[in-house]
Image: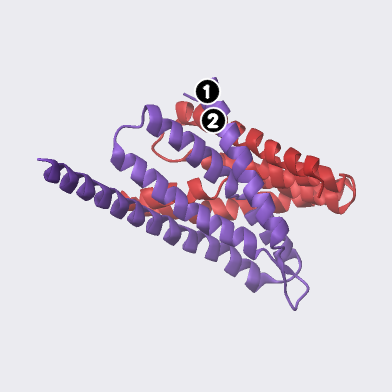
Chain colours: A red, B purple
Amino acid sequence: MSPLLFLAIATAGGAGAAARLYLDGVVCSRLGGAFPFGTTIINVSGSLLLGLVTGLAMHHLLAPEWSLVLGVGLLGGYTTFSTASFETVRLAQAHRYLAAVVNGMGMLVASVVAAALGLWAGLGLG
Amino acid sequence: MHLRWRYLGLVFLGGTVGTALRAALELALPPVDLASGSRLPLTTLGINLLGALLLGLLLEALGRGGLDADGRRTARVLLGTGLLGAFTTYSALATDSVVLLQGGAVGVALAYMVGTVLFGGLATWLGIVIGTALYRGRNAGDASAAGEQR
């Protein structure tokens, strides 16, 4: 991998992380902070988009370099596992067990379904 | 706070470093080839578990240190939301699982998905416990140091 491509992947990840902070702030101010909707919306939408990028790359509609910058970089930095896991543990610590299970397992199922839809759409476009 | 350019800049900076670390690890340690022809993303699993542990540690230590303001907020946004947020990833977890499912490796896919979330929760909790212990240790150290001075 060329240094320039590596740098492009890293900065795309930085941009994705900044987009995550911004969107989480918007969602939190609209829906309140009782349940971490922001991270759920971010991870499900990011999974849908990565499925799409992966599908397009499989059909060579997207150059490998672009699929790395968008997939590993932008969407990798936009979505997050650590925050999702922390929010789930915090819900469990507050004895909100149903909310913790919904946040942990619900997000997982929704993200996998979203990634499958994205992949299907990407492959369909090819 | 999300409208503050300063915090967006901090997250961009931390996120760039976190993504670079993740990309470097993924390059150095590619997915493991399974007998079925599928590829198990063990590096992504390791990254997500390590990042979850470190975020639990960081947020607990910062939270016990005092109000989320000034230096503590800067550290949380730069290292937590930015670096560890971007070091770990969810989109790859979801998409790699779909690719495993599509390849017929259903058992491996389910184990990878559920295992990441369960062990991730355990890692986060362990990080919180370590963060608590470190904070208490430091405080006990400060207290005895203050006692010696008297």
How many angstroms separate mark 1 from mark 2 (CA)? 6 Å
Find residue A89 and report its horizontal and vertical position in percent.
39, 52
Residue type (three-letter) at the residue carrying disc 1: Arg
Which residue is nearer to you in this view: B53 or B92? B53
In screen coordinates, is B39 left or right of B128?
Answer: right
Query: Residue A55: horizontal and vertical position, in percent?
Result: 81, 51
Q: What is the residue that sits farthest to the bottom in this orientation? A: B35
Indicate the secondary structure of the residue bearing disc 1: helix
Q: Label 2: few (<14), some or many (≥20) within 10 Å?
A: many
Evaluate whether residue A11 shows in this view. yes
As rendered, which of B82 and B147 lies closer to the eye?
B147
| Residue sitting at x 51%, y 52% | B51
Q: Which residue is painted at 71% across and 54% down in the image?
A: A116
Q: Which residue is drawn at 67% across and 42% down?
A: A75
Residue A86: image tag:
none
Q: Mark 2: which secondary structure?
A: helix
Q: In this view, does A7 lie to the left or right of A98?
A: right
Dot 1 surroundings within 10 Å: few (below 14), some, or many (20 or more)?
A: few
Residue B89 position, x and y percent, is: 60, 49
- In the rendered image, the residue lying farthest to the left is B150
Q: Do the CB atoms of the residues marked 1 and 2 lie less than 8 Å apart?
A: yes
Q: Mark 2 points at which residue?
A: B10
Give the image location of residue B53, x and y in percent: 45, 55
Residue that badge 1 annotates: B6
Residue A99 can be seen in this image: no
> Taking A36 as reference, is B100 above or below it?
below
The answer as to whether the residues below labels 1 and 2 share one chain is: yes
Chain at tag 1: B
> Amino acid type of disc 2?
Leu
Q: Which chain carries label 2?
A: B
The answer to whether residue B143 is above or below residue B104 is above
